[in-house]
Amino acid sequence: MSSSNIRRSMPLFSIGIVMQLTELSARQIRYYEEHQLITPMRTDGNRRLFSLNDIDRLLEIKDLLEQGVNLAGIKKLLFVNQVEQVPNEPIQKSEEIKKDLSDGELRKLLKSELLHGGRHRTTLRQGDMSRFFH
Amino acid sequence: MSSSNIRRSMPLFSIGIVMQLTELSARQIRYYEEHQLITPMRTDGNRRLFSLNDIDRLLEIKDLLEQGVNLAGIKKLLFVNQVEQVPNEPIQKSEEIKKDLSDGELRKLLKSELLHGGRHRTTLRQGDMSRFFH
DNA sequence: AATCAATGTTATGTTTTCTAACATGGAATT
DNA sequence: AATTCCATGTTAGAAAACATAACATTGATT
Protein backbone atom coordinates (compact mmCIF):
# COMPACT_ATOMS: atom_id res chain seq x y z
CA MET A 1 0.00 0.00 0.00
CA SER A 2 1.61 3.21 -1.17
CA SER A 3 1.40 6.35 0.88
CA SER A 4 -0.86 7.83 -1.73
CA ASN A 5 -3.24 4.93 -1.41
CA ILE A 6 -3.26 5.32 2.32
CA ARG A 7 -4.16 8.95 1.93
CA ARG A 8 -6.85 8.21 -0.58
CA SER A 9 -8.42 5.53 1.57
CA MET A 10 -8.73 7.65 4.69
CA PRO A 11 -12.31 7.86 5.90
CA LEU A 12 -12.89 11.60 6.05
CA PHE A 13 -16.11 12.73 4.44
CA SER A 14 -19.67 12.75 5.67
CA ILE A 15 -22.44 11.68 3.37
CA GLY A 16 -23.62 15.26 3.06
CA ILE A 17 -20.32 16.34 1.55
CA VAL A 18 -20.21 13.29 -0.69
CA MET A 19 -23.68 14.11 -1.93
CA GLN A 20 -22.48 17.55 -2.97
CA LEU A 21 -19.28 16.32 -4.56
CA THR A 22 -20.91 13.54 -6.52
CA GLU A 23 -24.36 15.06 -7.03
CA LEU A 24 -25.84 11.77 -5.92
CA SER A 25 -28.70 11.49 -3.46
CA ALA A 26 -28.24 9.85 -0.08
CA ARG A 27 -30.62 7.18 -1.26
CA GLN A 28 -28.45 6.40 -4.24
CA ILE A 29 -25.26 6.27 -2.21
CA ARG A 30 -26.79 3.98 0.39
CA TYR A 31 -28.29 1.81 -2.30
CA TYR A 32 -24.90 1.31 -3.92
CA GLU A 33 -23.48 0.41 -0.57
CA GLU A 34 -26.32 -2.00 0.00
CA HIS A 35 -25.28 -3.72 -3.20
CA GLN A 36 -21.66 -3.72 -2.11
CA LEU A 37 -20.31 -1.40 -4.76
CA ILE A 38 -18.75 0.68 -1.99
CA THR A 39 -18.04 -0.05 1.66
CA PRO A 40 -17.51 3.22 3.49
CA MET A 41 -16.24 3.14 7.05
CA ARG A 42 -18.45 3.95 10.02
CA THR A 43 -17.98 6.14 13.03
CA ASP A 44 -18.56 4.72 16.48
CA GLY A 45 -22.04 6.17 16.17
CA ASN A 46 -22.64 4.35 12.87
CA ARG A 47 -22.32 7.36 10.59
CA ARG A 48 -20.75 6.66 7.22
CA LEU A 49 -17.33 8.09 6.51
CA PHE A 50 -16.15 8.11 2.91
CA SER A 51 -12.64 8.20 1.52
CA LEU A 52 -11.39 9.79 -1.68
CA ASN A 53 -11.39 6.33 -3.19
CA ASP A 54 -15.02 5.92 -2.24
CA ILE A 55 -15.87 9.19 -3.94
CA ASP A 56 -13.86 8.16 -6.93
CA ARG A 57 -15.77 4.95 -7.17
CA LEU A 58 -19.12 6.67 -6.73
CA LEU A 59 -18.33 8.94 -9.62
CA GLU A 60 -17.41 5.96 -11.71
CA ILE A 61 -20.65 4.24 -10.77
CA LYS A 62 -22.56 7.34 -11.73
CA ASP A 63 -20.74 7.52 -15.02
CA LEU A 64 -21.39 3.90 -15.88
CA LEU A 65 -25.04 4.17 -14.91
CA GLU A 66 -25.39 7.12 -17.26
CA GLN A 67 -23.90 4.94 -19.94
CA GLY A 68 -26.61 2.39 -19.39
CA VAL A 69 -24.71 -0.18 -17.35
CA ASN A 70 -26.77 -1.65 -14.53
CA LEU A 71 -25.53 -2.26 -11.03
CA ALA A 72 -24.78 -5.92 -11.64
CA GLY A 73 -22.59 -4.97 -14.57
CA ILE A 74 -20.89 -2.21 -12.66
CA LYS A 75 -20.14 -4.60 -9.85
CA LYS A 76 -18.39 -6.95 -12.24
CA LEU A 77 -16.51 -4.11 -13.88
CA LEU A 78 -15.24 -2.78 -10.60
CA PHE A 79 -14.21 -6.23 -9.58
CA VAL A 80 -12.26 -7.12 -12.71
CA ASN A 81 -10.48 -3.82 -12.45
CA GLN A 82 -9.26 -4.87 -9.05
CA VAL A 83 -8.12 -8.36 -9.88
CA GLU A 84 -6.48 -7.42 -13.16
CA GLN A 85 -4.65 -4.64 -11.48
CA VAL A 86 -2.91 -6.63 -8.84
CA PRO A 87 -0.33 -8.26 -11.13
CA ASN A 88 0.63 -4.87 -12.51
CA GLU A 89 1.55 -3.63 -9.09
CA PRO A 90 5.29 -3.63 -8.58
CA ILE A 91 6.44 -6.03 -5.93
CA GLN A 92 6.62 -4.00 -2.80
CA LYS A 93 9.87 -3.54 -1.02
CA SER A 94 10.25 -5.19 2.29
CA GLU A 95 10.69 -1.73 3.75
CA GLU A 96 7.01 -1.12 3.23
CA ILE A 97 6.02 -3.32 6.06
CA LYS A 98 2.36 -4.03 6.21
CA LYS A 99 2.57 -5.19 9.78
CA ASP A 100 0.06 -3.79 12.16
CA LEU A 101 0.62 -0.18 13.04
CA SER A 102 -0.54 1.17 16.32
CA ASP A 103 -3.50 3.49 16.12
CA GLY A 104 -1.33 6.41 17.04
CA GLU A 105 1.26 5.67 14.41
CA LEU A 106 -1.39 5.20 11.81
CA ARG A 107 -3.07 8.46 12.70
CA LYS A 108 0.19 10.34 12.48
CA LEU A 109 0.96 8.79 9.13
CA LEU A 110 -2.45 9.53 7.77
CA LYS A 111 -2.29 13.08 8.97
CA SER A 112 1.00 13.74 7.25
CA GLU A 113 -0.18 12.01 4.13
CA LEU A 114 -3.33 14.00 4.00
CA LEU A 115 -1.68 17.30 4.55
CA HIS A 116 1.30 16.65 2.42
CA GLY A 117 -0.97 16.03 -0.50
CA GLY A 118 -0.57 13.63 -3.36
CA ARG A 119 2.18 14.29 -5.83
CA HIS A 120 2.27 10.95 -7.57
CA ARG A 121 -0.70 8.94 -8.64
CA THR A 122 -1.05 5.24 -8.35
CA THR A 123 -4.64 5.15 -9.44
CA LEU A 124 -6.09 2.07 -11.01
CA ARG A 125 -8.20 3.34 -13.84
CA GLN A 126 -5.83 5.98 -15.03
CA GLY A 127 -7.21 8.55 -17.36
CA ASP A 128 -10.68 8.14 -16.02
CA MET A 129 -10.60 11.52 -14.41
CA SER A 130 -10.61 13.22 -17.78
CA ARG A 131 -14.35 13.12 -17.76
CA PHE A 132 -14.42 15.80 -15.11
CA PHE A 133 -12.96 18.39 -17.40
CA HIS A 134 -15.83 18.94 -19.78
CA MET B 1 -6.03 31.77 -6.94
CA SER B 2 -4.30 28.65 -8.19
CA SER B 3 -6.20 25.44 -8.68
CA SER B 4 -4.32 23.98 -5.76
CA ASN B 5 -5.45 26.81 -3.54
CA ILE B 6 -9.01 26.30 -4.64
CA ARG B 7 -8.75 22.67 -3.74
CA ARG B 8 -7.18 23.41 -0.40
CA SER B 9 -9.79 25.97 0.52
CA MET B 10 -12.77 23.72 -0.19
CA PRO B 11 -14.96 23.33 2.90
CA LEU B 12 -15.10 19.58 3.30
CA PHE B 13 -14.49 18.38 6.83
CA SER B 14 -16.72 18.21 9.87
CA ILE B 15 -15.41 19.24 13.24
CA GLY B 16 -15.30 15.63 14.35
CA ILE B 17 -12.83 14.71 11.64
CA VAL B 18 -10.81 17.83 12.26
CA MET B 19 -10.60 16.92 15.94
CA GLN B 20 -9.11 13.57 15.01
CA LEU B 21 -6.70 14.97 12.46
CA THR B 22 -5.44 17.76 14.67
CA GLU B 23 -5.91 16.14 18.06
CA LEU B 24 -7.53 19.33 19.25
CA SER B 25 -10.74 19.42 21.27
CA ALA B 26 -13.90 20.94 19.87
CA ARG B 27 -13.61 23.55 22.55
CA GLN B 28 -10.17 24.54 21.36
CA ILE B 29 -11.16 24.71 17.74
CA ARG B 30 -14.19 26.83 18.50
CA TYR B 31 -12.18 29.04 20.78
CA TYR B 32 -9.66 29.73 18.03
CA GLU B 33 -12.47 30.57 15.68
CA GLU B 34 -13.98 32.84 18.28
CA HIS B 35 -10.70 34.71 18.29
CA GLN B 36 -10.66 34.81 14.50
CA LEU B 37 -7.64 32.65 13.95
CA ILE B 38 -9.71 30.53 11.57
CA THR B 39 -13.00 31.15 9.83
CA PRO B 40 -14.45 27.83 8.70
CA MET B 41 -17.47 27.83 6.43
CA ARG B 42 -20.91 26.83 7.62
CA THR B 43 -23.54 24.55 6.20
CA ASP B 44 -27.07 25.81 5.74
CA GLY B 45 -27.75 24.25 9.11
CA ASN B 46 -24.87 26.15 10.74
CA ARG B 47 -22.45 23.23 11.06
CA ARG B 48 -18.80 24.15 10.59
CA LEU B 49 -17.04 22.87 7.50
CA PHE B 50 -13.25 23.04 7.45
CA SER B 51 -10.88 23.12 4.51
CA LEU B 52 -7.39 21.69 4.24
CA ASN B 53 -6.11 25.20 4.75
CA ASP B 54 -8.11 25.44 7.96
CA ILE B 55 -6.61 22.19 9.19
CA ASP B 56 -3.20 23.40 8.19
CA ARG B 57 -3.69 26.53 10.18
CA LEU B 58 -5.02 24.69 13.20
CA LEU B 59 -1.92 22.54 13.25
CA GLU B 60 0.22 25.64 13.06
CA ILE B 61 -1.72 27.20 15.91
CA LYS B 62 -1.23 24.08 17.96
CA ASP B 63 2.46 24.09 17.19
CA LEU B 64 2.93 27.71 18.15
CA LEU B 65 0.94 27.28 21.33
CA GLU B 66 3.21 24.43 22.31
CA GLN B 67 6.12 26.76 21.71
CA GLY B 68 4.67 29.20 24.20
CA VAL B 69 3.17 31.76 21.84
CA ASN B 70 -0.20 33.04 22.99
CA LEU B 71 -3.21 33.55 20.77
CA ALA B 72 -2.58 37.25 20.31
CA GLY B 73 0.91 36.50 19.05
CA ILE B 74 -0.29 33.71 16.82
CA LYS B 75 -2.86 36.00 15.31
CA LYS B 76 -0.17 38.49 14.38
CA LEU B 77 2.09 35.78 13.02
CA LEU B 78 -0.60 34.35 10.82
CA PHE B 79 -1.40 37.79 9.56
CA VAL B 80 2.13 38.81 8.63
CA ASN B 81 2.57 35.51 6.86
CA GLN B 82 -0.31 36.41 4.66
CA VAL B 83 0.74 39.93 3.78
CA GLU B 84 4.37 39.08 3.20
CA GLN B 85 3.44 36.24 0.94
CA VAL B 86 1.39 38.14 -1.55
CA PRO B 87 4.34 39.81 -3.37
CA ASN B 88 5.99 36.43 -3.87
CA GLU B 89 3.00 35.17 -5.82
CA PRO B 90 3.70 35.23 -9.54
CA ILE B 91 1.51 37.61 -11.47
CA GLN B 92 -1.36 35.53 -12.67
CA LYS B 93 -2.02 35.16 -16.35
CA SER B 94 -5.09 36.81 -17.72
CA GLU B 95 -6.23 33.32 -18.68
CA GLU B 96 -6.88 32.62 -15.05
CA ILE B 97 -9.95 34.74 -14.99
CA LYS B 98 -11.26 35.42 -11.58
CA LYS B 99 -14.63 36.45 -12.88
CA ASP B 100 -17.58 34.98 -11.15
CA LEU B 101 -18.12 31.33 -11.90
CA SER B 102 -21.55 29.86 -11.79
CA ASP B 103 -22.17 27.56 -8.89
CA GLY B 104 -22.26 24.61 -11.20
CA GLU B 105 -18.99 25.47 -12.86
CA LEU B 106 -17.35 26.03 -9.53
CA ARG B 107 -18.59 22.76 -8.17
CA LYS B 108 -17.30 20.89 -11.20
CA LEU B 109 -13.95 22.56 -10.91
CA LEU B 110 -13.69 21.85 -7.23
CA LYS B 111 -14.65 18.28 -7.77
CA SER B 112 -11.98 17.72 -10.36
CA GLU B 113 -9.43 19.54 -8.31
CA LEU B 114 -10.19 17.51 -5.27
CA LEU B 115 -10.11 14.23 -7.01
CA HIS B 116 -7.20 14.99 -9.21
CA GLY B 117 -5.10 15.64 -6.18
CA GLY B 118 -2.39 18.22 -5.67
CA ARG B 119 0.80 17.74 -7.58
CA HIS B 120 2.36 21.13 -7.07
CA ARG B 121 2.42 23.00 -3.83
CA THR B 122 1.92 26.71 -3.48
CA THR B 123 1.83 26.67 0.28
CA LEU B 124 2.71 29.72 2.22
CA ARG B 125 4.85 28.49 5.07
CA GLN B 126 6.83 26.03 3.10
CA GLY B 127 8.79 23.49 5.07
CA ASP B 128 6.40 23.68 7.94
CA MET B 129 5.02 20.26 7.19
CA SER B 130 8.28 18.63 8.18
CA ARG B 131 7.14 18.57 11.76
CA PHE B 132 4.62 15.87 10.94
CA PHE B 133 7.27 13.32 10.16
CA HIS B 134 8.60 12.63 13.61
C1' DA C 1 -5.39 37.29 46.52
C1' DA C 2 -7.15 38.62 42.25
C1' DT C 3 -7.00 38.49 37.32
C1' DC C 4 -6.54 36.55 32.94
C1' DA C 5 -5.85 33.16 29.21
C1' DA C 6 -6.83 28.73 27.63
C1' DT C 7 -9.44 24.82 28.15
C1' DG C 8 -12.78 21.52 30.41
C1' DT C 9 -17.51 20.39 31.46
C1' DT C 10 -22.38 20.45 31.33
C1' DA C 11 -26.99 21.60 29.71
C1' DT C 12 -30.16 22.20 26.13
C1' DG C 13 -31.62 22.71 21.43
C1' DT C 14 -30.99 21.89 16.30
C1' DT C 15 -29.10 19.56 12.31
C1' DT C 16 -27.66 15.57 10.17
C1' DT C 17 -27.67 10.91 9.45
C1' DC C 18 -29.45 6.39 10.36
C1' DT C 19 -32.71 2.37 9.19
C1' DA C 20 -36.91 0.75 7.50
C1' DA C 21 -40.95 0.89 5.00
C1' DC C 22 -43.70 2.17 1.33
C1' DA C 23 -44.29 4.69 -3.30
C1' DT C 24 -43.12 5.52 -8.18
C1' DG C 25 -41.55 5.53 -12.96
C1' DG C 26 -39.60 3.16 -16.62
C1' DA C 27 -37.89 -1.04 -18.78
C1' DA C 28 -38.28 -5.74 -19.46
C1' DT C 29 -40.99 -9.88 -19.30
C1' DT C 30 -44.81 -12.69 -19.48
C1' DA D 1 -51.97 -5.33 -21.03
C1' DA D 2 -50.58 -6.79 -16.77
C1' DT D 3 -46.71 -7.98 -14.03
C1' DT D 4 -42.20 -7.82 -12.36
C1' DC D 5 -37.97 -5.70 -11.41
C1' DC D 6 -34.52 -2.05 -10.99
C1' DA D 7 -33.24 2.29 -9.43
C1' DT D 8 -34.71 6.00 -6.92
C1' DG D 9 -37.96 9.11 -4.24
C1' DT D 10 -40.29 9.99 0.02
C1' DT D 11 -41.57 9.68 4.72
C1' DA D 12 -41.31 8.55 9.68
C1' DG D 13 -39.02 7.98 13.89
C1' DA D 14 -34.70 7.39 16.47
C1' DA D 15 -29.98 8.42 17.43
C1' DA D 16 -25.58 10.76 16.63
C1' DA D 17 -23.14 14.88 15.95
C1' DC D 18 -22.82 19.51 16.47
C1' DA D 19 -24.45 24.17 17.90
C1' DT D 20 -24.34 27.95 21.61
C1' DA D 21 -24.01 29.42 26.23
C1' DA D 22 -22.84 29.29 30.89
C1' DC D 23 -20.06 28.01 34.54
C1' DA D 24 -15.72 25.55 36.35
C1' DT D 25 -10.79 24.77 36.47
C1' DT D 26 -5.88 25.35 35.99
C1' DG D 27 -1.69 27.72 35.68
C1' DA D 28 0.68 31.95 35.02
C1' DT D 29 0.94 36.96 35.97
C1' DT D 30 0.01 40.90 38.41
Image: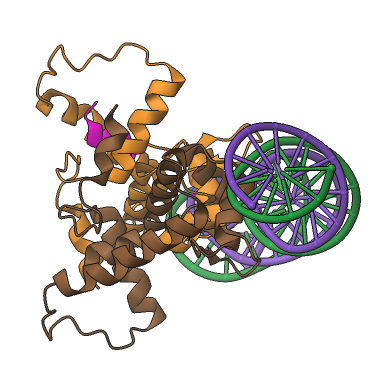
Chain colours: A orange, B brown, C green, D purple
Task: Using residue B112 as the reference point, say whether residue C15 is left or right of it.
Answer: right
Where does the magenta region start and end? A1-9
Q: Is residue A70 visible?
A: no
Q: Is residue A6 magenta?
A: yes
Q: Position of residue A110 (x, y in %)?
A: 35, 33
User: Magenta region, mostly helix, strand or loop?
Assistant: helix
Q: Quadrant of the C terminus of chain B?
A: top left
Residue B45's quadrant in the figure?
A: bottom right
Nearer to the camera, A23 or D27: D27
Residue at the (14%, 43%) spot, across then down: A120
Nearer to the camera, A103 or A82: A103
Nearer to the camera, A102 or A38: A102
Q: Is residue A20 visible?
A: yes
Numbered marks: total: 0
Q: Position of residue A126 (x, y in %)?
A: 15, 47
Residue at the (20%, 39%) spot, across then down: A124
Q: Is residue A19 magenta?
A: no
Residue A48's quadrant in the figure?
A: top right
Seen in the picture, residue B75 relative to B19 is either above or below; the reply is: below
Seen in the picture, residue B125 relative to D16 is either above or below; the reply is: below
Task: Using residue B25 as the reference point, say whether residue B105 is left or right of it.
Answer: left
Residue at the (41%, 63%) spot, across then down: B76
Q: Position of residue B127 (x, y in %)?
A: 20, 46
Nearer to the camera, A3 or B19: B19
Q: Quadrant of the N terminus of chain B?
A: bottom left
Residue at the (11%, 73%) spot, across then down: B90
Q: Position of residue A113 (x, y in %)?
A: 29, 38
Task: Using residue B82 as the reference point, say whether residue C22 is left or right of it.
Answer: right
